[in-house]
Each structure stands twice: as structure tokens, then as C-alpha cells.
Image (cartoon, grey):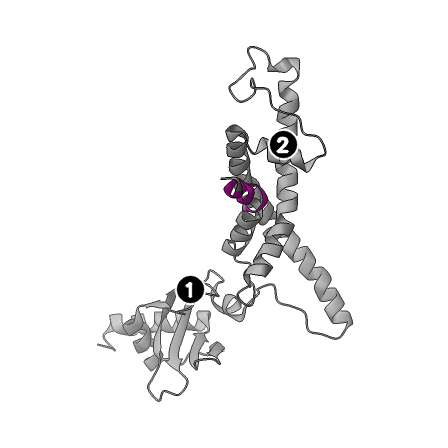
Amino acid sequence: MKSLISVIIFTLPGLLAYFWINLFGLTPTTKRESSEVVAISALLWIPIVAIILFMYQIMALITHLSIAQPPFDIIFIKKDWTLLSNKITDLNKLSENIWFLLFYIFSSIIISFLVAKFIMQKGYKFMLEQVNKVREENGIAPLSEKTTVWNEMFLNNKGQVVEFSKGESSEAGIVGSLVKVPRAHEPDKGIVLEAVDHWTKVMEYYHVDIDHTFIDTSNGTVIKVYNSDQALEAQRLYRERVDNGSIS
């Protein structure tokens, strides 16, 4: 039981923040080793626990003031909360209290989410700006805001018409509208295309420029991304010809 409590107290907040950051889309270029995850979680643990203990100390002070008397003595305030000193042993002692443990877990979920959100929206961009300044001063190309080529190409929340094929295959690729793509480090890069027959016929009748071509050098997969504006215009012209009976 003590081991479980220690994991909750000293590991949970940082791991939660790391989980939120990855869920928000800030994924590393490669899968991290367990030791790296532990180190990052330990760094994230510091600000989260500092905020949680600050909140706890404020609420503990309230219980020692006259305001914590009727009619203000609601259920979680009327109990006498132990004031924290500067000793780490206070945290261990408080962890034996089930109410503090529940408060700690619930607070960890919320605070880790907010800290991860701040890092994703503000902290990472600020850090990237500073890193790129140094890289440019050293004559090195700046880093992209997206951490992987896959994220840069396909996780931008916009409609894309693509052609999927194998590099060594002589057969025509599969053309369709991309609706589902995996995250960067999913082992299988399965994608979902819709309106395959429709877009295949559109591309047979009209030429549409290819904006980008993604090549997976490990397995030879090729995904060509068509120009969105031209693809929509070609689709409009194709539908007009279908409506006019020019195309059956």
C-alpha cells in the first residue's frame, strides 16, 4: 500500500501532464525510453505539486480562521487541515489521510491538464523560438513547430484529397478524400479514405497538381497530396458534366 501511495504522490502528476501533452499533439520524433519518460515526468511534477500544495495550504489556513465557523463550515472546510511546514515528511504524513489523497488525485488531474495546456499553447512555442534563434545564429535550419513529418503533413485538421500507392508498384494508386489518419507513433499507419470511386473518376478527367508527396523510406509507401483548390474545382466541373449528361 505504501508503494502505491508513493507512486500516486511522486509519479502521478508528472505522468498525467506527460499524457496530456502527448494527447494535445506534442509528440516526440521517436518513442521515448522509460527512463526518459521518468525524467520528463519528474520535471513536470515540480510545478504541478507546487500549485497543489499551495492550494492545500490556503485551504488549511482557512480552516484555522474564524471564517470557518457557521454558516461557512462546509464539509471540506470544517475539518481541521494540517498546515504544511518546509519538510518533505509532511507530505508523507498527509498521504496517510484518505481525504488528502483524494484531494491530491483530483487536483492532479485538473492541474496537470492546465499545466500541459499552458506548455502546449505558450511554453513550447516560446522555447522553440529561443532554440531557433540559436540555431539560426549557428547557421542551422530552424525546427518546425510540428515534431514529426507525419504530423506536419496529415494532422492539420483540413480536408485533403490524396493518392496512396506503394513505391515499387506499377498499379495506379488509390485516390480518395482523407478522413482518418493515425497518430505519429502508432505502429500501423492505417488511413481511411472516402469517396474513392468518385475521386478516381474526377482525376481521370481533370489534371490536378500535387502539392506534396509523403514517402515512407522504411516501407516504400507513397502518399501524394493534391492541391485542395484545384481538386474542388475539378470536382465541380466533373459534377456539371455529370448533370449535363456529358459523363455517364
- Measuring from the top left, give residue 166's x and y in whole percent: 39, 82
Q: Quadrant of residue 229?
A: bottom left
**In x, y percent, where is residue 77?**
56, 20
Residue 169 visible in image: yes
Q: Amino acid at mark 2?
A: Met
Distance between mark 1 and mark 2 Cα atoms: 39 Å
What's the residue at 56%, 34% (across, down)? Answer: 95
Tag 1–tag 2 contact (CB < 8 Å): no
Residue 36, placed above or below residue 108: below
Reply above or below: 236 against 122.
below
Position of the C terminus by quadrant: bottom left
Circle 1 packing at 10 Å, graded few (<14), some (14-19), many (20+), is some
Q: Which is the main secondary structure of the residues drawn in magenta?
A: helix
Q: Residue 55, labelled with which disc? A: 2
- Observer-side mark, 1 or 2, equals 2
The mark nearer the N terminus, 1 or 2, is 2
Segment colored magenta: 3-11
Circle 1 residue: 182
- Please tell me whether residue 33 belongs to the stretch shown in magenta: no
Quadrant assignment, res 83: top right
| Of residues 112 and 224, the one drawn nearer to the viewer in this rendering | 112
Looking at the image, residue 210 lies above or below residue 43: below
Q: Is residue 99 left or right of residue 164?
A: right
Seen in the picture, residue 177 relative to 44 is either above or below; the reply is: below
Q: Nearer the viewer, residue 211 or 89?
A: 89
